[in-house]
Image (tube, grey):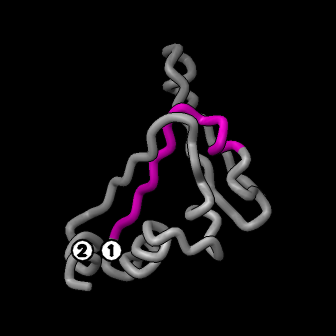
Amino acid sequence: MNQVFADAEALASGVAQWLCTLTSESRGRFAISSAHVAFLATGAAKANIVARVQSQDRALPAARVQPRGRLHWFIDSAVAADITAR
């Protein structure tokens, strides 16, 4: 199931900010129509998943995301260090 959370303070200011959680049931439908999609990954434990997503491992819902706009990655130094060490 998708989880979508609106930042109530941002909505009150007229700027919508959303957080969506991908699951196998979502199949990335919302992300295909999105202008911008961002992934956030922190900690060395996430490096393997990030590497699999970036190598287009279609077993992961995040690897199937193809927005009509830009895809942004926000990773910390622990994720980056483990990925570049491969």
Relative placement, left or right, of 51 versus 10 is left
User: Where residue 70 sits in the image (x, y, percent)?
Assistant: 45, 39
Residue at left 20%, top 83%? 85
Q: Secondary structure at mark 1?
A: loop
Does residue 10 lie above or below 55 as drawn? above
Closer to the camera in the image, 85 or 41: 85
User: Where residue 34 sits in the image (x, y, percent)?
Assistant: 60, 35
Residue 70 colored magenta?
no
Does residue 62 lie above or below 29 as drawn? below
Q: Give the amino acid at mark 2.
A: Ala
Q: Which residue is mark 1?
A: 43
Residue at left 49%, top 15%? 13
Quote the CA–CA distance across marks 1 and 2: 5 Å
User: Where residue 75 sits in the image (x, y, percent)?
Assistant: 31, 61
Residue 32 colored magenta?
yes
Residue at left 73%, top 58%? 27
Q: Are marks 1 and 2 in contact (CB under 8 Å)?
A: yes
Residue at left 73%, top 47%? 29
Q: Residues within 10 Å of mark 1 (few under 14, many from 20)?
A: some
**Res 68 → quadrant:** top right
Q: Give the amino acid at mark 1.
A: Gly
First along the sequence among labels 1 and 2:
1
Q: Which residue is mark 2?
A: 78
Does residue 43 lie above or below 31 as drawn? below
Which residues make up the magenta segment?
A: 30-42
